[in-house]
Image: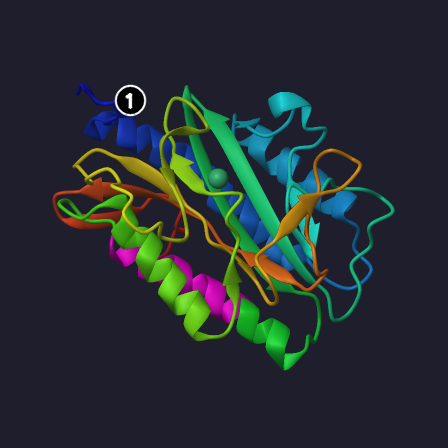
Amino acid sequence: MGKVSSIRLKTGEEIARIRAASRIVAQVLEILENAVAPGVSTFELDQLAERHCRECGGVPAFKGYYGFPASLCASINEEVVHGIPSRRRVLQEGDIVSLDFGVLYQGFYGDAAITLPVGRVSERKQQLIQVTEEALYKGIEQARIGNRVADISRAVQEHAEAAGFSIVRQYVGHGVGAQLHEAPEVPNYCTAGKSTPRLLEGMVLAIEPMVNMGGYAVKTLDDHWTVVTEDRQPSAHFEHSVAITATGPRILSRRDSPGSE
Ligand code: MG
């Protein structure tokens, strides 16, 4: 299949390859979900993630990407994205932790993220997690032929803001395929008057709402990676890699369930 502007459309075979990479991502996130507990360090999570990825024949996509020093992004509480795993970062009861993982497998990438509670967390943090995941699925529901990128953005934004939360502006979702980050950008907010690409069969998008409990402003710490909320209130992040198909959105990074391909 050809290109539309700079957006690369994928063949069925290419989508199957992105699914294969994304399945490894889903398995890694399931392993991490079972491992997250008070007393576990983000270094240990990084090790678990990289081990499973490599056992499957995959390559951790983030390791070395613009010099990122680990396989997993692990972002605790007010950290939004790109947290660097460390032996010194030990999860505490009441934290929330966002885990973002990418895999390169046989020439194609998969990318997904989840936010998990550590033990018991406050009701407001639990709501932040729930609303962010719901916002992701509201966005995915709009990933249909004939819609525009802005239809995804609007669905995500409306759901998060209706709960009193705010949408991070500085980081956005993206196309995914033979490159980890491809066109188009997939913002989680709408810009008035801005035309966005029409969604076509064969696009594969990483849709990834980052939702803050307080204000939307973020900044990068002195480690040059960790993005935190300016007001230091918590943030949550969910992501799936999604193909736009004739029969609707297909979540390539979903977990296997009995009877699924
Ligand atoms: Mg991504």
Q: Is residue 222 above or below residue 107?
A: below
Residue at the spot 45% in from the left edge and 25% down from the top edge: 105
Looking at the rendered image, the quarter that the C terminus falls into is: top left
Answer with left or right where residue 16 lies relative to residue 54.
left
Answer with left or right where residue 188 lies relative to residue 165.
left
Q: What segment carries the magenta color?
A: 129-142
Tell me if residue 141 is in the magenta stretch: yes
Q: Quadrant of residue 154?
A: bottom left
Residue 82, x across and y down, in percent:
65, 41
Residue at the spot 87% in from the left edge and 47% down from the top edge: 88
Q: Label 1 amino acid?
A: Ser
Residue 161, x across and y down, in percent:
44, 68
Answer with left or right where residue 133 lies relative to residue 214.
left
Q: Is residue 201 above or below residue 95?
A: above
Which sits in the foreground, 220 or 97? 220
Which sits in the foreground, 159 or 70? 159
Q: Quadrant of residue 43?
A: top right
Label 1: which secondary element: loop
Residue at the spot 40% in from the left edge and 53% down from the top edge: 189
Residue 84, x across and y down, in percent:
73, 40
Residue ranking furthest to the right:
88
Q: Is residue 124 above or below residue 17?
A: below
Looking at the rendered image, the quarter that the N terminus falls into is: top left
User: Would you say the magenta stretch is mainly helix, strand or loop?
Assistant: helix
Answer with left or right where residue 247 lies relative to residue 225.
left
Q: Is residue 182 above or below residue 52?
A: above
Question: What residue is disc 1 on?
Answer: 6
Residue at the spot 13% in from the left edge and 48% down from the top edge: 247
Residue 22, x across and y down, in percent:
42, 38
